Amino acid sequence: MQKRKPYLTPTEVASLLMVSPITVRQWAAKGLLKAELTLGGHRRFMRHEIERFARDNGLSLQHKSAGAASRLLIVDDDPQLVTLIREMLDEHRDLVIETAVDGFDAGIKVQQFVPEIMLMDLMMPGLDGFEVCRRLKSDPVTRGIRVIAMTGFPSPENNARALEAGAERCISKPFDITTLYDVFGQPAAAAR
């Protein structure tokens, strides 16, 4: 068994905090996240510093072992679309998928299933995707969930509202397999 390193690279920190390595570097450059410099000028982050930063900012660390599956919650009131997305992601071996039919159902599933990623429709009856996203991002326990918004009504306004609510990005429906795999950072060809 490999011994755990006391320090992490920017990419390893990004994976733990579910952000991009560029964000980690920006936090370090602004002095928000303390980094040590190697003789070669590379940033390294002590584990205790990452834990402190996460605690102070209400972030949860993703302690996922190599090869462990990510947990995806698909939230959409169109059962045909949900089935299609499941089929499109069927070969994506590192995903465990759960579904919800509306914003209220999503709230329950978030507590029970504890997803890392949510693929969520913006226009749903009752509690819409904008409000679900705002609530997730305002709660320190769920703030770290990656939210990918999807809409059948693409517009600059809807895109801006989704991003303002805390979504990572907004994709237009219908979308193809390439777009879907791009959301998860894996080219479609590599997943097959």
Image (cartoon, helix red, strand yellow):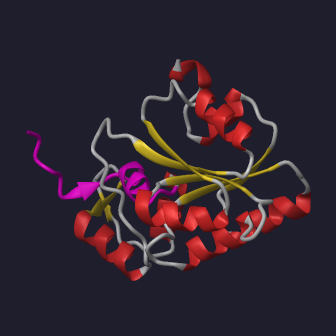
Q: In the picture, residue 172 is in which quadrant?
A: top right
Residue 105 among magenta residues: no
Residue 2 among magenta residues: yes
In the image, is residue 56 above or below residue 44? below
Residue 133: x and y in percent read 65, 68
In the image, is residue 152 above or below residue 157? above
Foreground: 44 or 102? 102
Q: Is residue 134 left or right of residue 44?
A: right
Foreground: 164 or 139? 139
Q: Is residue 160 left or right of residue 51?
A: right
Q: Residue at x 80, y 68 (%)?
A: 161
Residue 71: x and y in percent read 45, 48
Foreground: 186 or 141? 141
Q: Is residue 41 left or right of residue 97?
A: left
Instruction: State which region is magenta.
Output: 1-19
Q: Residue at x 39, y 68 (%)?
A: 60
Q: Residue at x 46, y 38 (%)?
A: 95
Q: Residue at x 69, y 28 (%)?
A: 178
Query: Which quarter shows the N terminus?
Result: top left
Residue 69: x and y in percent read 38, 40
